[in-house]
Amino acid sequence: MVKVKVAIPNEGGFVNQHFGRSKEFVIFELSGGEIKGQEVVSTAALQHNHEGLAELFKRKGVDTIILGGVGPRAIQALQLHGLKVITGASGSVGEVARAYARGELVTREVSCCEHGHGHDHRCHE
């Protein structure tokens, strides 16, 4: 069976809709359509450091990043490190990971961050 690791930005058990402000990610190990393990990783020191986040995920063996709202520069940084990026996810991180494991999660286009968050970055993420 193929094992895959995915990372999802976590905020109170739900997908954090602002990738660059995520203080922690849950890394799920998936196999056979199920969650086989999980690890919570603090990323508070790496907020808005897209290259640093990508390097951390690669060191942890992550294959895919599942995100909610994210800007084009962040997507590019992740992809340049060989990571698959799925955008537009929402809901509980566990449910999102299970949906991905079952092959039911599809990427949705996002226009940067799809929420108001009090700073003006015009999708520079």
Image (cartoon, rainbow, N blue to C red):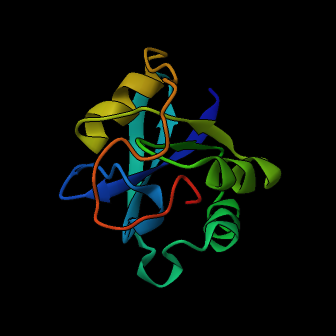
78 relative to 12 in the view: left or right:
right
104 relative to 117 in the view: left or right:
right
In depth, the one of 2 and 21 nearer the eye is: 21
Total labels drawn: 0
> Can residue 44 be spotted in the picture?
yes
Q: Which residue is pictured at 38% across the width and 33% down the height?
A: 89
Q: Is residue 25 above or below residue 107?
A: below
Q: Picture quarter containing residue 23?
A: bottom left
Instruction: Farthest residue to the bottom: give it.
Output: 45
Q: In this view, does 119 lie above or below 44?
A: above
Q: Which residue is pictured at 41% across the width and 61% down the height?
A: 25
> Can residue 62 be spotted in the picture?
no
80 relative to 11 in the view: left or right:
right
Residue 40 image offset from top left, x and y in percent: 37, 65
Residue 66 image offset from top left, x and y in percent: 49, 41
Residue 59 image offset from top left, x and y in percent: 69, 67
Instruction: Farthest residue to the left: give it.
Output: 12
Residue 55 image offset from top left, x and y in percent: 70, 68
**Image quadrant occupied by the N terminus:** top right
Q: Which residue is pictured at 42% across the width and 64% down the height?
A: 120
Q: In this view, does 63 lie above or below 55?
A: above
**Image quadrant occupied by the C terminus:** bottom right
Q: Which residue is pictured at 71% across the width and 46% down the height?
A: 83
